[in-house]
Image: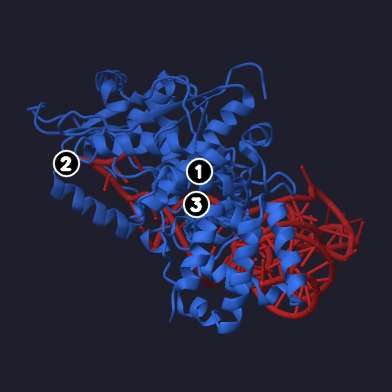
RNA sequence: GGUCCCUUCGUCUAUCGGUUAGGACACUAGAUUUUCAUUCUAGGAAGAGCGGUUCGACUCCGCUAGGGACUGCCA
């Protein structure tokens, strides 16, 4: 990157709901680009719409970003706090002729919009070239007075050069009737004041970029570089919505995805570095450049996300995964004791190779948390014939005699037992597993026994053997 | 309707005028296997269409089709 000016990026969500996964990716790109260039990444809450902004939404955004591991450099800026500054800029624009008061009523506007649409042109206000009414303080908005000729070109870092004929750009409202600044004015002023050099945002703002560029010009400010990234679509190509299963980053957390996995997946979505699919934050920062982001909207692929998550699950710390897993189990109504936690932790190295999400991890751990006596499902029940009961009885005795209750030794013991019985493991495994887990899936038998411990294992076997059906 | 954007296997992508168009996920088949899962091997699978430019086009240009964004005193 050029050394002339340090890069400053920002993520600027409006607090009107949860943190959308598409927004999270935009935030990620901003952070990645800033870190890659050694610049700064800022957060600004766009709360100029007082009616729709809520404290809950602000909290949801903070929580979502924090969970995802996105950390702005410096305190977040609340846009509404700069309202006076925004009004002052508009005042200056008014005095320089870069803006004008518009006294159109709602009805006037509706009629004009209809006419403009019918004629295939941009909306125009008659007050643009008209003297103010006698009562200049009558209800009005302040509009930007943009050029009618020429064109505005946005050299978008992602989309390439995009040209707009100025006559197609309408005079947007800068100040509402109540004197409140609007988004399009506030972004320009704040981005300028915050020293933002690169505006990386959703491509739903591409059209606004041209109008905003005009405001920069009128103010005599140099505009930042723009990069409009496409939105994330659902698997069917339609805009991501509720019916696709998840929209908020919180949804993904609840579904058992790890933040580092989501970062990996989201970064790879719409951006690539050769054949690299799995990478950590340091690699992402070293490789990421906003110019390499794809133009086309990308679809959310659950299978791929699961695959990436499975990878990071295996890399994750066992104690951390145990905490996550027990939380899910607790939410399912299981009351877990310290013994359960200890067993889950001990089994975690093998459990985590068998799951794609924390939810599946909890499924895999359920054989541990069952309470004696276990209820056997029909299939497990059917395995307990007279023959297998007798064999199980002999196996239980062999198990009771061993003084080394470890995975490898238990494996040897079971194999030796099978040899002694003159049968294959297939004659022993299913029944033993059935009485140990009640029919729930579990790891290799020796690992299952080790995870349960001697007392619990023998207890479960004996429970089943003493139960007559 | 208008303005703007997008288009390589089902999906995410690599390719930056000359490749048998590569990888990953998913899928199919086989191997391994005491449940569930894993793992291993092999395989099928793409340049939206039509015109140009060029010795040569997935790569450049145009048109068409399809998808999307915006068109608010929301952001």
Residue B54 vs A282, above or below: the answer is below
| Chain letter corresponding to the colour red | B
Query: On the rendered structure, is A305 left or right of A119?
Result: right
Residue A112 rendering spot, x and y as whole percentages: 23, 51
Q: Which mark is residue A358?
A: 3
Could you say whether the residue bearing mark 2 is in a helix, strand or loop?
Answer: loop
Q: Which mark is residue A342?
A: 1
Q: Residues within 10 Å of mark 3 (few under 14, many from 20)?
A: many
Q: CA distance from mark 3 to mark 2?
A: 57 Å
Q: Which mark is residue A104?
A: 2
Residue B60 vs A133, above or below: the answer is below
Could you say whether the residue bearing mark 3 is in a helix, strand or loop?
Answer: helix
Q: In the image shown, does A15 or B73 lie closer to the viewer?
A: A15
Q: Quadrant of residue A214?
A: top left
| Chain letter corresponding to the colour blue | A
| Callout in the foreground (3, 2) | 3
* Number of marks in the rendered image: 3
| Callout in the foreground (1, 3) | 1
Q: In the image shown, does A200 or A177 lie closer to the viewer?
A: A200
Q: Residue at position x 59%, y 17% from top?
A: A5
Q: How is the image coloured?
A: by chain
């Amino acid at each position: 990157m050029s050394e002339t000016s340090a890069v400053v990026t920002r993520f600027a969500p409006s607090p009107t709901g949860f943190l959308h996964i598409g927004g999270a990716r935009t935030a990620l790109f901003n952070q990645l680009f800033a870190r890659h260039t050694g610049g700064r990444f800022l957060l600004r809450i766009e709360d100029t719409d007082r009616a729709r902004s809520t404290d809950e939404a602000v909290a949801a955004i903070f929580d979502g970003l924090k969970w995802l591991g996105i950390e702005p450099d410096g305190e977040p800026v609340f846009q509404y706090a700069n309202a006076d500054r925004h009004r002052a800029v508009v005042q200056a624009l008014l005095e320089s002729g870069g803006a004008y008061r518009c006294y159109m009523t709602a009805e006037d506007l509706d009629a004009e919009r209809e006419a403009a649409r019918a004629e295939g042109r941009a909306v125009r206000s008659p007050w643009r070239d008209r003297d103010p009414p006698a009562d200049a303080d009558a209800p009005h908005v302040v509009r930007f007075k943009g050029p009618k000729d020429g064109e505005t070109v946005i050299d978008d870092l992602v989309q390439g050069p995009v040209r707009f004929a100025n006559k197609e750009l309408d005079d947007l409202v800068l100040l509402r009737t109540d004197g409140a600044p609007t988004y399009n004015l506030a972004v320009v002023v704040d981005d300028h004041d915050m020293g933002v050099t690169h505006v990386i945002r959703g491509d739903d703002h591409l059209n606004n970029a041209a109008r905003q560029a005009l405001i920069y010009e009128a103010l005599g400010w140099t505009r930042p570089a723009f990069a409009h990234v496409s939105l994330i679509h659902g698997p069917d190509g339609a805009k991501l919505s509720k019916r696709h299963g998840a929209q908020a980053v919180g949804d993904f957390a609840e579904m058992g995805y790890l933040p580092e996995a989501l970062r990996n997946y989201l970064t790879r979505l719409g951006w690539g570095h050769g054949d690299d699919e799995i990478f950590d934050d340091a690699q992402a920062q070293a490789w990421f450049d906003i110019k390499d982001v794809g133009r086309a909207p990308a679809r959310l692929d659950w299978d791929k996300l699961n695959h990436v998550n499975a990878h990071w699950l295996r890399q994750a710390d066992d104690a951390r995964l145990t905490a996550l897993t027990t939380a899910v189990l607790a939410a399912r109504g299981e009351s877990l004791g310290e013994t359960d936690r200890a067993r889950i932790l001990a089994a975690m190295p093998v459990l985590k190779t068998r799951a794609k999400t924390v939810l599946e991890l909890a499924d895999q751990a359920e054989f541990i948390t069952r309470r004696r006596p276990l209820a056997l499902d029909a299939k497990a029940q059917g395995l307990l014939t007279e023959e297998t009961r007798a064999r199980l009885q002999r196996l239980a005795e062999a198990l009771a005699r061993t003084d080394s209750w470890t995975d490898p030794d238990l494996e040897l013991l079971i194999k030796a037992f099978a040899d002694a019985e003159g049968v294959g493991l297939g004659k022993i495994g299913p029944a033993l597993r059935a009485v140990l887990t009640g029919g729930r899936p579990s790891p290799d038998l020796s690992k299952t026994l080790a995870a349960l411990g001697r007392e619990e294992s023998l207890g479960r076997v004996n429970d089943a053997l003493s139960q007559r059906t």
